[in-house]
Amino acid sequence: MSITRRSGVREVASEVAAALGRKGLRAVLSGGGCASIYTGGRYQSVDLDFIIQGPGTQGQLDEAMASIGFARRAMQYFHPLTRYYVEFPPGPLGIGVDYRIEPVEDAARGRPLLMLSPTDSCRDRLASFYHWNDRQGLDVAVRIAARHRVDIEKIRTWSEQERSLRRFEVFLEDLERFRRRMRRRRLSAPAGRAGSRRRGSR
């Protein structure tokens, strides 16, 4: 697989991860890139943040990225055929005060990609709501939690550590409202469309 003008966020991220791996670099996708994948594209980010796990040099990064057509400008990497650009924020991998992050491996279409889990991606978006009142961060966290199984108790405990239990309750309220809205939409959908979805999900 190579990067084309039609490559989506998952394809570009997988190509980057594979190129880094060939240079012996282990990297975890975080930030908006994870949120884009977990929301099924409802949230769009063109900035792909990878955290390098372990030692690595700027030369290794440049060589790995050049091997798939990316060129570095300052500390960002750009490709002529895609709008997505890549950054490598300094580690360690952390979300707020929690640095015990265990990434998950997603292997869609046989292309492994280390990334934040749905729970951690949800927390990552909530952190911007907790500390910078980013309402979009709250909305994206709700969408992630609505689409995926997340560990609510882990999020609650972390929210307490972040001194943001009040905002955690706002998150729970918005999540329940969102789920109710989705249930109403499913119930009001025409029978043919609902049946098509059921057939397609098997």
Image (tube, grey):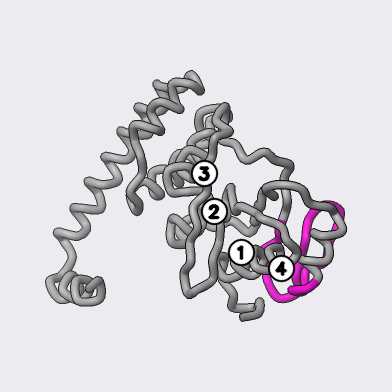
Query: Which mark is first along the chain, 3 or 1?
Result: 1
Residue holding disc 2: 115
Comparing marks 1 and 3, which lies closer to the viewer?
A: 3
- In percent of the image, x 51 and y 57: which residue is there? 36
Image marks 4 and 1: residues in contact by CB distance under 8 Å? no
Three-letter code, disc 2: Met
In the rendered structure, which segment of residues is drawn in magenta?
67-86
The secondary element bearing badge 1 is classed as helix
Asked if 124 appears above or below 45 in the picture, the reply is above
Question: In which quadrant is the N terminus drawn?
Answer: bottom right
Residue holding disc 3: 102
Comparing marks 3 and 2, which lies closer to the viewer?
A: 3
Residue holding disc 1: 13
Query: Which mark is first along the chain, 2 or 3?
Result: 3
The extreme top residue here reads 163
Residue holding disc 4: 22
How far apart marks 4 and 3 lie (CA) works out to: 22 Å
Asked if 139 appears above or below 19 in the picture, the reply is above
Picture coordinates of residue 192, whole percent (x, y)? 15, 76
